[in-house]
């Protein structure tokens, strides 16, 4: 059975490396080994009977509803050219400094990360807009490619992030399983909101480290990061017009989660609506109706955080009545703005493209999730999880040795596998073992998220590198791209060691916000 479990994992990796579709590989290899296991008597077919229940559990999981909503946000920001406007204005703001264009790319990457979790759209957008300009101005190709690739992956660690949603759901299930196996039959839970809060400070530290790296180039290799010689004056009004709407949207989404006003799923719906309004404003500047709708969304978040807006409560004070009336008026303004914006997006052809792209990406994520569920069932039926548990617990060095081994395995798998495969296949196997050893689930989730972020940057199969290679000119070699991302990978590894030494970096904010004991 151990040989079959190991062979199953190896064959799966082999098929993935050949380029065969991930979901079909996970499901097909699982069924193949389940069939052979039943022939040899090593696999109980009763495990397969649990599959419908797994699929139903996925269908009824409210947390996962946030995935298509955040995908919609990212796609709409990219197709409506909001990201392009943001990058152009930030470039003008910092371009007069040595390394300023690199700093602007990092900051825009952080803002887009806090608005969406789609790496491909961010890397491609910034690659098309920033790469030619930075190369033309004399920036070193390795710095340019590394900065764009790394900034594009910030959406994996800065909430709201699709990785954090998927990983948070897996960690929550693993945490409950670990507690039950320890004999705790009324287990504690961990929410995606706590994972979001835990990842926020490490994500901002990562942004700061990327900016310090740009400053380091400006100090030690100033000829490689020239200032932008542009006589065009920077208009503060244009800069604020480009920056304020995305920042308001970020505060509405993240603020509502951290304040406990909304769940990640509810906040994702707020973000999707806000993005629709931003797209409409981008298509036709100066629309008072859309700007009023955007301000109304922010106002609704503030009202919901300070007043009880339920109309069915027994005692409604005068203050509550006024707040409810204001909320109703704001809802009407938002609805009117949404209708106007959707009409503009439909006429311009953006809405159709965004909906098709969102459907494709969402379908890919969930079909992989179903394939991974089948893989984990068969792997467990072949006692593969017990084999992994026995191997990890027998390692010398205690908890930290096990943690280091798991992180190293995930890091190496990131060279060849996508974060979705690692999240759905590897994490459910190793997370219960680590959590049973006493590691904090939020801290562990953040550690894994940062580790998974490197899967987009590690050669030879980092997806961010592929995205950038697809839009980079022929003058930029693949070797430049590979060498350029290595310092950023080292920065992320350094952050992992900092989290090990100072776990409060990831646990302080969730403890403060969610009042954990």
Image (cartoon, rainbow, N blue to C red):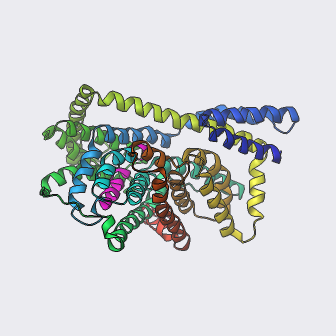
Q: Within the magenta stretch, is there residue 24?
A: no
| Extreme residue toward the front, this view | 475
Q: Can residue 43 be seen at all in this image of the molecule?
A: yes
Where's residue 457, x and y in %? Answer: 50, 54
Nearer-the-camera pick, 111 or 55: 111
Could you tell me which residue is drawn at 46 percent across and 39 percent down?
A: 65
Nearer-the-camera pick, 512 or 121: 121
Could you tell me which residue is drawn at 39 percent across and 46 percent down?
A: 472
Characterize the magenta stretch by its predominant secondary structure.
helix
Q: Can residue 329 be seen at all in this image of the molecule?
A: no
Nearer-the-camera pick, 315 or 424: 424
Total tally of numbered discs in the picture:
0
Is 446 rendered above or below residue 363? below
> Is residue 169 shown left or right of residue 384?
left
Where's residue 52, x and y in %? Answer: 65, 31
Where's residue 85, x and y in %? Answer: 24, 46
Could you tell me which residue is drawn at 17 percent across and 36 percent down?
A: 284
| Extreme residue toward the right, this view | 40
Is 126 rendered above or below residue 368? below
Quadrant in the picture for residue 77: top left
Quarter in which the N terminus is drawn = top right
Q: Within the magenta stretch, is there residue 114?
A: yes
Where's residue 45, x and y in %? Answer: 79, 33
Q: Give the range drawn in magenta.
A: 102-121
Quadrant in the picture for residue 313: top left
> Is residue 40 shown left or right of residue 489?
right
């Amino acid at each position: 059975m151990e040989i079959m479990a190991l062979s199953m994992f190896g064959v799966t990796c082999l098929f993935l490396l050949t380029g065969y579709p991930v979901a079909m590989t996970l499901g097909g290899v699982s069924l193949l080994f389940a069939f052979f296991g039943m022939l040899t008597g090593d696999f109980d077919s009763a495990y397969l009977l649990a599959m419908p229940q797994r699929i139903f559990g996925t269908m009824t999981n409210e947390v996962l509803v946030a995935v298509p909503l955040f995908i919609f946000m990212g796609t709409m920001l990219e197709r409506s050219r909001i990201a392009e406007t943001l990058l152009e204005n930030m470039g003008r703001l910092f371009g007069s400094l040595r390394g300023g264009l690199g700093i602007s790319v990092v900051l825009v990457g952080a803002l887009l990360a806090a608005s969406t979790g789609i790496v491909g759209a961010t890397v491609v957008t910034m690659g098309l807009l920033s790469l030619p300009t930075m190369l033309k101005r004399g920036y070193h190709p390795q710095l340019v490619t590394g900065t764009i690739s790394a900034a594009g992956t910030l959406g994996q660690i800065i909430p709201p992030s699709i990785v954090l949603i998927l990983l948070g759901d897996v960690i929550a299930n693993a945490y409950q399983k670990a507690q039950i196996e320890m004999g705790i039959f009324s287990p504690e839970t961990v929410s995606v909101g706590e994972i979001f809060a835990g990842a926020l400070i490490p994500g901002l530290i990562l942004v700061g480290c990327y900016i310090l790296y740009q400053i380091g180039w400006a100090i030690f290799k100033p000829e490689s990061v020239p200032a932008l010689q542009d006589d065009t004056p920077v208009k503060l009004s244009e800069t604020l017009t480009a920056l304020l709407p995305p920042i308001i949207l970020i505060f509405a989404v993240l603020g509502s989660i951290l304040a406990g006003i909304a769940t990640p799923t509810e906040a994702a719906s707020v973000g999707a609506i806000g993005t629709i309004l931003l797209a409409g404003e981008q298509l036709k500047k100066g629309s008072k109706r859309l700007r009023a709708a955007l301000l109304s969304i922010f106002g609704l978040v503030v009202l919901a955080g300070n007043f009880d807006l339920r109309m069915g409560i027994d005692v409604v004070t005068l203050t509550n009545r006024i707040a409810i009336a204001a909320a109703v008026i704001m809802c009407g303004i938002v609805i009117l703005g949404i209708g106007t914006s959707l009409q503009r997006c439909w006429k311009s052809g953006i809405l159709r493209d965004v909906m098709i792209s969102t459907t494709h990406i969402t379908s890919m994520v969930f079909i992989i999730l179903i394939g991974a569920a089948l893989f984990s069932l068969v792997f467990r039926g072949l006692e593969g999880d017990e084999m992994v548990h026995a191997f990890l617990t027998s390692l010398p060095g205690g908890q930290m040795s096990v943690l280091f081994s798991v992180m190293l395995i995930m890091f190496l798998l990131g060279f060849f596998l996508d974060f979705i495969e690692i999240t759905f296949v590897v994490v459910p196997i190793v997370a219960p073992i680590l959590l049973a050893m006493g590691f904090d689930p939020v801290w562990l989730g953040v550690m894994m998220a940062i580790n998974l972020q490197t899967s987009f940057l590690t050669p030879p199969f980092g997806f961010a590198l592929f995205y950038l290679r697809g839009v980079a000119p022929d003058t930029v070699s693949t070797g430049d791209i590979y060498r350029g991302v290595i310092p950023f990978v080292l920065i992320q590894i350094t952050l992992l060691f900092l989290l090990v030494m100072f776990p409060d970096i990831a646990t302080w904010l969730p403890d403060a916000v969610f009042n954990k004991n």
